[in-house]
Amino acid sequence: MTIGWVKAILQRGVIQVLMIASPLLISALVIGLIVAILQATTSIQEQTLVFVPKVVVILVVLAVLGGWMFTSLGDYTRQLFNMIPSMAR
């Protein structure tokens, strides 16, 4: 095992985390911005108003993309487990 190999494994891990987390984070960010703009235009400053739409959108994104997320993570995990015998040499 070389430093380059470890670096490649870590890079793929970071990319995997970003691929899985980005749909959730981006959707929560967009909804937060939309609700913040609506709050600013209507002068409603309720702190809990942002929470419910974010939770609903995150649950919808998980329902739509959850299968892909778990499949992608499972494939990456299988790749790591398949690399274990070659690491032991």
Image (tube, rainbow, N blue to C red):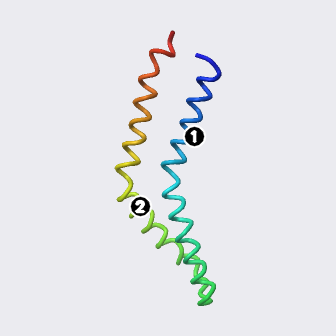
Q: Dot 2 surroundings within 10 Å: few (below 14), some, or many (20 or more)? A: some
Residue 76 image offset from top left, x and y in percent: 44, 35
Above or below for 41 versus 50 = below
Q: Residue at x 55, y 76 (%)?
A: 34
Q: Secondary structure at mark 1?
A: helix
Indicate the quadrant where residue 43 lies.
Answer: bottom right
Along the line of sight, the residue nearer the viewer: 31 or 45: 31
Q: Amino acid at mark 1?
A: Val
Helix, strand or loop status at disc 2:
helix
| Residue marked by disc 2 | 61
Quadrant of the drawing holding the N terminus:
top right
What type is the residue that disc 2 sits on? Answer: Val
Label 1 crowding class (10 Å Cα cut-off): few <14, some 14-19, many 20+?
A: few
Toward the top, the furthest residue is 89
The reply to whether dot 1 and dot 2 touch (C-beta < 8 Å) is no
Name which quarter of the figure residue 44 lies in. bottom right
| For marks 1 and 2 on the same chain, the one whose residue lies earlier in the sequence | 1
- Residue shown at the point (34%, 50%) measured from the top left: 67
**Horizontal and vertical percent position of residue 48:** 54, 76
Which residue appears at 56% of the width and 66% of the height?
29
In the rendered structure, find residue 14 and report the number of the disc placed on it.
1
Q: Which mark is residue 38?
A: none
Q: Is residue 80 above or below residue 88?
A: below
As rendered, which of 17 and 45 lies closer to the eye? 17
Horizontally, residue 60 falls left or right of residue 3, namely left
What's the distance in space between the residues labelled 1 and 2, CA to CA? 21 Å
Q: Position of residue 71 (x, y in %)?
A: 36, 42
Number of marks in picture: 2
Q: Is 69 drawn above or below residue 43 in the view shown? A: above
